[in-house]
């Protein structure tokens, strides 16, 4: 009997009001995935890196298997601090948005390890091309929180001079490229930067992050083609947090194959990683960075994680997923997992953790006070209006000169009347 083709629409595993269902997440035992030499040719890299999941921390919070990066206690404490700082900064800025003091915000709760562990595994000279949930990159590289807050306030010290939405930071001195509201533009930009570094004979590499939904954009495929053909020294990260705003990750292609499986089709190794395991993210990033620096080419890393909060302050996740999902997520909380690991081996304690939370909370509050001293959305000092006409053309064209003069005439008229 013949059958007619039917349109398939990938279903979400659970809708609002239903019990959470994460049975589609294949979780292998920690330490069970082999770690090939970073210089191994693609055809010799086992498929288990794509279809299984690199995990280091087991259910008892002990590091197991060949991917254990064997970080010393100081490095672990730094990682925990950066993740906590990211989370507490996020919490503060959400409160400020709800109080009407900033217009918009996007939290990274549950995804802190994806940024922090990767940043720590890379070198300061490596160029980072983030997405809009990578504030942990800025914090890991030592960014003053007040600088980030200034951008959200669009005040007189705003790094973007009022020209970007809140949270679309950049940091030239920290080698962090500007965030774009147009999805996936950072992928080809990262590949291009990496190609230029290779042409100049430098050993700095590039790294970029996108969400799994963005992997369906054309820029993803353009970047993958160029990275493969020219063996660009770049680490390309897909942060699979299960939702592209309100759309389940299956709609972007995750229902059929892991997103890491897109790499080998382009001749690029793919690795599927437990994105809530700080040690696993660090190890996979270090592996990929070693490949890139040695001239072996790019790597695609899929970080399996979960967006615990709303997509943004404009989103209500209860309209498309179960409210119980964040608590049911099987890979846990990256902050709590690293904390438990350190306590298990006598490198941390609940008392020290509480003290660190109090310390960082105070630092965040102080940074907010500093940022507000440069102006808020309703109180000066404000940005100079002349900034509207700067930083676009090397030599300002006549029509902009004319418009600026008209603006100044209106200001003078207002002062006189």
Image: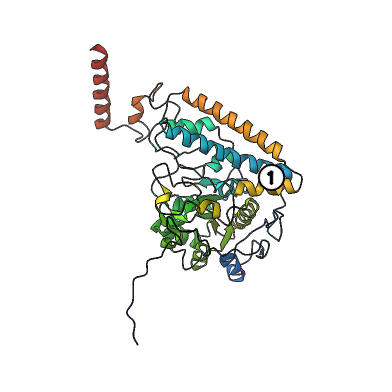
33 sits left or right of 260 in the view: right
Where is 390 relative to 10, above or below? above
Please tell me whether mark 1 sits on a helix, a strand or a loop.
helix
In x, y percent, where is residue 291?
A: 61, 58
Seen at 55% across and 40% down, the residue is 87
Render colour scheme: rainbow
Q: Tag 1: Cα neighbours inside 10 Å, few (<14), some, or many (≥20)?
A: many
In x, y percent, where is residue 5?
A: 33, 77
200 sits left or right of 405 in the view: right
Residue 234 visible to an observer of this rendering: no
Where is 315 relative to 212, above or below? above
Q: Nearer the viewer, residue 17 or 414?
A: 17
Q: Nearer the viewer, residue 379 or 25?
A: 25
Q: Which quarter of the rendering shows the N terminus?
A: bottom left
Seen at 56% across and 35% down, the residue is 143
Q: Residue furthest right?
A: 346
Where is 108 relative to 49, above or below? above
Instruction: Quickly name the residue at label 1.
Output: 76
Seen at 50% across and 62% down, the residue is 259
Place residue 361 in its image quadrant.
Answer: top right
Q: Which quarter of the rendering shows the C terminus?
A: top left
In x, y percent, where is residue 342?
A: 71, 46
In x, y percent, where is residue 307?
A: 50, 50
Q: Nearer the viewer, residue 152 or 18?
A: 18
What number of labels is visible? 1
Q: Residue furthest bottom?
A: 1
Residue 16 visible to an observer of this rendering: yes
Seen at 41% across and 21% down, the residue is 381
Where is 361 relative to 87, above or below? above
391 sits left or right of 343 in the view: left
Q: Nearer the viewer, residue 36 or 49?
A: 49
Q: Residue furthest top?
A: 416
């Amino acid at each position: 009997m013949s059958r007619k083709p039917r349109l398939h629409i990938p279903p979400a595993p659970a809708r609002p009001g239903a019990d959470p269902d994460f049975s589609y997440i294949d979780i292998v035992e920690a330490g069970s995935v082999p770690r090939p030499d970073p210089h191994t040719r693609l055809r010799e890299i086992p498929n288990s890196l794509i279809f299984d999941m690199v995990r280091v921390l087991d259910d008892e919070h002990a590091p197991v298997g060949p991917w254990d990066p064997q970080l010393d206690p100081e490095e672990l404490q730094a990682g925990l601090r950066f993740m906590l700082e990211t989370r507490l900064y996020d919490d503060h800025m959400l409160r400020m948005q709800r109080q009407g003091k900033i217009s918009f915000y996007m939290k990274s709760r549950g995804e802190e390890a994806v940024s922090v562990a990767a940043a720590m595994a890379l070198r300061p000279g490596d160029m980072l091309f983030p997405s809009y949930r990578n504030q942990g990159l800025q914090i890991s590289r030592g960014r003053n929180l007040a600088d980030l807050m200034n951008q959200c306030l669009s005040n007189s010290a705003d790094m973007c001079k009022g020209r970007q939405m809140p949270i679309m930071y950049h940091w030239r001195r920290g080698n962090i490229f500007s965030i774009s509201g147009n999805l996936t533009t950072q992928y080809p930009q990262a590949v291009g930067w990496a190609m230029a570094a290779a042409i100049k004979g430098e050993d700095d590499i590039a790294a970029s992050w996108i969400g799994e939904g963005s992997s369906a954009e054309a820029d993803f495929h353009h970047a993958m083609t160029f990275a493969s053909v020219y063996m660009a020294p770049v680490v390309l990260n897909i942060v699979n947090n299960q939702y592209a705003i309100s759309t389940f990750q299956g709609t972007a292609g995750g229902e059929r194959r892991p997103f890491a499986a897109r790499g080998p089709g382009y001749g690029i190794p793919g690795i599927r990683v437990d994105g809530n395991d700080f040690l696993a993210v660090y190890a996979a990033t270090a592996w990929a960075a070693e490949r890139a620096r040695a001239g072996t080419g790019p790597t695609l890393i899929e970080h399996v994680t979960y967006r615990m909060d709303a997509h943004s302050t404009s989103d209500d996740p209860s309209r498309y997923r179960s409210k119980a999902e964040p608590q049911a997520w099987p890979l846990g909380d990256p902050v709590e997992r690293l904390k438990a690991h350190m306590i298990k081996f006598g490198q941390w304690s609940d008392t020290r953790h509480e003290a660190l939370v109090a310390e960082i909370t105070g630092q965040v509050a102080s940074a907010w006070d500093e940022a507000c001293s440069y102006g808020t959305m309703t109180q000066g000092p404000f940005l100079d209006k002349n900034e509207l006409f700067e930083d676009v053309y090397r030599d300002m064209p006549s029509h902009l000169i004319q418009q600026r003069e008209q603006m100044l005439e209106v200001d003078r008229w207002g002062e006189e009347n």
